[in-house]
Image (cartoon, coloured by chain):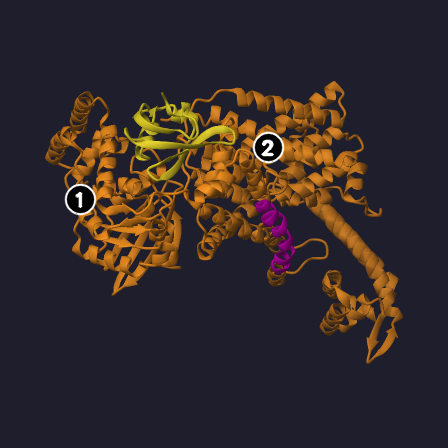
Amino acid sequence: MSKDSGKILVAVAGQPNSGKSTIFNALTGARQHVANYPGVTVEKKTGSYSLNNDKVELVDLPGTYSLTSYTQEERVAKDFLLNEGPSVIVDVMDASNLERNLYLTFQLAEMGIPLVINLNMMDVAERRGITIDIEKLGQKLGAPVVPTVGNRGKGKQELKEAVNETSKEARSSQFRLDYGEGLESSLGALEKALARDAALPGLYPLRWLAVKLMENDTEAQRLIKENSNDGNKILNFVAKKRRDCTSKHEKTPEKTIAQMRYQAAQEIIEACVTRERAIKSSLTDRIDQVVLNRFLGPIILAAGIYVIYELAIVQGYKITPYTWRMLAWIRDCIASTLPSEGFIVDPFFRSMPLWVIDGTIAVLNYIPIFLILFGLIATLEDTGYMARMAFILDRVFRYFGLHGQSVLPMVLGGLYVGGCAIPGVMATRAMKDEKARLATIMVVPLMNCLAKIPFYILMIGLFFSAYKGIAMFFIATITIIIALSVAKILSLTILRREESAPFILEMPAYHLPTVQGVLRRCLERTWLFVKKIITIVIVVAVIVYALIYLPGISSERKDHYLNQANRAQQAFFNKIEKDNPYTVFLAGDKLIEFALYWDAYSKAKMAARGKKARETMDQRFREKNLAYFKVVKKGEYNIEGKVIRDKDAKKAYTAYKKLDRTRSRLRRGYRDETIVSGYMGRAGRFIEPFTKWAGFNWRVNIALMSSFAAKENSVATLGGIYQSPPGEKEGVLEERMREKEKDWTALHVLAIMLFMAMYPPCIPTLLMVRLETGSTKWMLFATFYPIVLGLILSILVFTGGSLLGLSGMQAMIAFYIFALLILVGMGLIKREPEYS
Amino acid sequence: MTLDEMKPGQVAEIIDVTADGVLGQRLLDMGFIPGTKLHIVRNAPLIDPVELEMKGYHISLRHSEAKEVEVKAV
């Protein structure tokens, strides 16, 4: 099909750790496109290149050891080969591990598609003293064999040429594996039966179908049921043949088939491969003696995780102020194109877009962290250490329905304090055990992400300031304890029926990652993330905005604010007196213009560091508007080197300063009232009778609900709600909260902190959950279960603690012990692995 | 005896894979074929899983999975 359009469709297949991605990258260069295979979460990479006027389109199949129907990857690879009709399969093989790689090659050859064998990692094979007779191997397999060293691009051109030539010959592999007398007679009979069917011939390679049916492959059975008119008859025939074979060989046909494949692989090895010397202990073995040592192994692992955390989260966080400056600049640029600010009430088309932009850049600000994280993860993946990590930790995590591979996602999510759930959820992609993977995705957001930290600090400052260290330790570790218990509960209940997979994990030889390969993956993943943010977050942010700020405050209240503003403006003009020359510059519409100038000047003054910066800033503002400049400088400025003291300007300055305070108070009051009377505010009041059992009043309800858009907002929202009463001096937020919530105890704060710890994932994380689970249902579950859990825990702590008359610290310790007991209980529940 | 009873440092020869379904198939795919020799390299720091070497490559599996492989010591 693809040949007609002048395009050659090529599938790149191979086992994991064969260097398949490296070959794919070497062939296609930068022209790549990453998406998912339809309906599943398996990544599909496509790319292209041109050779001698032929355009070749490559599809990177997932790395698989075999082509059964047991895993998503294998189903995807098989479906692609069956349904998309590639002209050629490039089979990437690890030359140093030929026997096991041939096992897949045989299965690919059975599919009747022309093969090009790519012996990759020739350098590793040479180092191990392995010599391969390439010509002989090609004869045996009936396909061209091209040796390459993928990470050095060696053999790339030859491989491209072989692909072109093979696609033109369109000759399927001449290799036909002999499954032995007993099985072959059954296969022959079955093949004949399939050939007699009205629909099957031409749809699928019949020999392949016959082998798969004898293997008891569920997908092959489905193909028969769906396509054949007489499917049941065929399947009954298969069942009979399977019984015959089992009794004849005293083992199931799938065992015989696997055995014959390995036997054939050994025969080929004997004919084509010579080992010059006995394998002495390799570098990998020597490294593993240290890295997997009973005592050193866990220490090295902990140190490695700490380094990742330190480099990405701590150091990455230090870069964010610079990105923030850039993002803030972009925000200001966009803001300047929007309708301008009002004295009290901002126009909708200013406040709404700014809200969306703020929400977006709050997350984009983490890009440096993501870049470093993804780079480090790619490095870890390429070196082969990931498998070791799973090996060391599987025992612990398995007790809780997780997997050794769950550790990295959880670390990224914030196993120590401060991570991000987005890369955490993304990192679950490497996990093969679907059940453990889902459990991991569901609990990663329970970890303490960076955005939760300011909230904790505020709350701890409120009532646990004497025990800061203990309280922080509590919150950092209680989340792990709860997450593990939750994972176990999920895997025993709703995840019970999900597909589990055996652990069986290859421990690949270590090798040095290439800078190019790491960079490519790191940029690819970051880009994927950014793309998602820009597309969907905007829509969700608009909805959240509407919930918070609509329907808006009543017109009476609005008038009240506008009247107050008018009165303040009147007072301002009275104060600077009629004969003040600046009245002209500030009257009417000019006042708001001046207000904006004033705000811009204050902001610039705060940002400007050093004498030089301040001077250039002054120059800029002076050029913009000289009269305003005189006012904001309190009437002291230079003209032609002379210092002028302008009394009128000073008067205007003093008066405006007062007006500005009133203005910001009114603005905040207006905003606060809008939030309180908005849909979310009403909801906050409505659920107060219920949430009071958790110790949350409506103010807390609003703050917690509005944090949903981005947790970064939680502290800001609280700041808005707990504003200083008019006329009083502004205090620190902690003081203001204490002032307003006189009846609060440490129990209130503990309950709120626990709720925040369990807080539902932010929108970008939810999008990642949607992407990685491929299901909206799971995304919704990930949204709502933490709310329910958080409420239960908060009620338990608050109401329970109140009834028992516990102090904050006592409640904290009691809850910690309670959670630990649950954890131990969960760990003790036996879980036998069930494989469907 | 079964593979999980073998100690690190020992060499075993596979007699049979007793598991069916996905575990059985996965073991077969990875080369757990009767007659194959494997070397028990080490247990994980927490004893489970176990690392083996066979057919020139390294693989690790849980003890519960190793229980499904019948072997004899060589």
Which kind of residue does numbered mark 1 sit on? Phe
User: Looking at the colours in the rendered structure, which chain would you say is drawn in orange?
Assistant: A
Residue at 23% over, 54% down: A2
Residue at 18% over, 49% down: A139
Q: Percent x, y for residue A514?
A: 45, 55
Q: The numbered mark 2 sits on a residue in which chain?
A: A
Q: Is residue A407 visible?
A: yes
* Residue at image mark 2: A480
Q: Percent x, y for residue A158?
A: 27, 59
* Residue at image mark 1: A175
Residue at 76% over, 66% down: A610
Report the side of A84 relative to A193 (left or right).
right
Q: Percent x, y for residue A572?
A: 83, 60
Label 2: which secondary element = helix
Q: Are marks 1 and 2 in contact (CB under 8 Å)?
A: no
Q: Which residues are magenta?
A: A307-328
Task: Name above or below for residue A218 compared with residue A388.
Answer: above
Report the side of A475 relative to B15 (left or right).
right
**Residue sitting farthest toward the front:** A277
Q: Are marks 1 and 2 on the same chain?
A: yes
Q: Is residue A563 visible?
A: no
User: Looking at the colours in the rendered structure, which chain would you say is drawn in yellow?
Assistant: B
Q: Residues within 10 Å of mark 1 (few under 14, many from 20)?
A: some
Q: Main secondary structure of the magenta part?
A: helix
The count of marks equals 2
Q: Name the residue nearer the viewer: A22 or A291.
A: A291
From the viewer's perspective, is the residue at label 1 or at label 2 nearer? 1
Q: The numbered mark 1 sits on a residue in which chain?
A: A
